[in-house]
Amino acid sequence: MLQIALPNKGALADGAVTLAEEAGYHCRRRGRELSVRDPDHGVEFVFLRPRDIATYVSKGIIDLGVTGLDLTYDSGAEVTHVLDLGFGNARFCYAAPKDAGLTPDDFTDTTRIATSYDTLVRRDLDARGVDARVISLDGAVEISIQLGVADVIADVVQTGRTIDEAGLETIGDPILNTEAVLVAQNGTTMEQEAAQRFAERVEGIIVAREYVVVEYDLPEAHLPEAREITPGIESPTVSPLNKDGWVAVKAMIERDAVNKVMDSLTELDARGIIITDIRTCRI
């Protein structure tokens, strides 16, 4: 039975379960179960600390895992990066007191940096040629500067609200742009049929979240311009209407472009423009 690790808590947990369920798998816990079996698909979902998932996968204890790219890099685990999952987006950044005027270029060997991501920070400092003091803390690093433990912190930033409330601001470029990822053990894991099927289904959900279907009626004379606006994946589907000189058009478009596309189609005298969500797809 294929074993897939999902985060047991934290920002990635809900997104991972939702994605697996939308892909057709039964994985939602009723309480605090450590695992949930889906016998119809030959899969067991195991709920682990997000920070540990890449390590379990790299050792072959778990076949696939959903975790953060930042946690994967920080673990030092050697795994195969299968898919970006499109949620849990964040930046891993340095932060310092507001108006301190400090940048990463100012770090010295005496700079104290508090973080829960020692490996990521040390790699960045090595690249900068700075042997700053890295202070390892298990969460809530924002308070460390106020308590006099550190001069700078390095942490995951999503909205920035937490560091702002702590009187801090990000400095320099992000060390890493992170998001949820699907990882597998290096080797033959992805040759398993069940692993391939899971990855393909998940990818179908991810792609579907980026696109919608647009349908509209159009004077046939404007079809060349409409094809430019809604080219579809290969080409739009065009069908004749029971009205001389008119056709029905159907195509996939990027979700972010919906309003711009509708404006452009309206200028071409398109009628009955309908946008429909896609639950899953294979391209």
Image: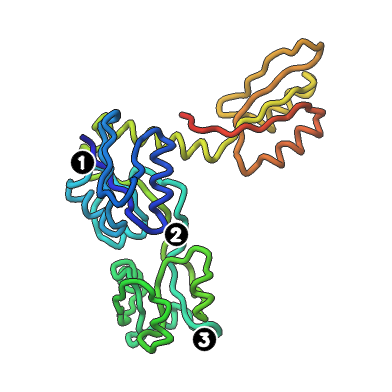
Where residue 126 appears, x then y in whole percent? 31, 72
In the image as oriented, which residue stretches furthest toward the front? 31
Which comes before the other along the chain, label 3 or label 2?
Answer: 3
- Alpha-carbon span between mark 1 and mark 2: 26 Å
Where disc 3 sits, the SS reads: loop
- Alpha-carbon span between mark 3 and mark 2: 24 Å
Mark 1 surroundings: few (<14), some (14-19) or many (≥20) residues within 10 A: few
Kindly check if marks 1 and 3 are in contact, taking CB atoms under 8 A apart as contact: no
Where residue 119 appears, x then y in whole percent? 29, 67
- Alpha-carbon span between mark 1 and mark 3: 48 Å
Residue drawn 63% across and 24% down?
Answer: 236
Check residue 100 in the rendering and tell me which mark sits there, or answer none.
3
- Between 254 and 198, the residue placed more toward the observer is 198
Quadrant in which residue 191 is drawn = top left
Amino acid type indicated by mark 1: Gly
Up/down of 224 relative to 57, above or below: above
Residue drawn 34% across and 35% down?
Answer: 198
Mark 2 surroundings: few (<14), some (14-19) or many (≥20) residues within 10 A: some
Q: Is residue 185 left or right of residue 168?
A: left
Where disc 1 sits, the SS reads: loop
Amino acid type indicated by mark 2: Asn
Check residue 177 in the rendering and tell me which mark sits there, or answer none.
2
Q: Is residue 10 left or right of residue 195?
A: right
Up/down of 276 relative to 57, above or below: above
Kindly check if marks 3 and 2 are in contact, taking CB atoms under 8 A apart as contact: no
Where disc 2 sits, the SS reads: strand
Q: Which residue is mark 1?
A: 187
Amino acid type indicated by mark 3: Ala
**Snapshot colouring:** rainbow
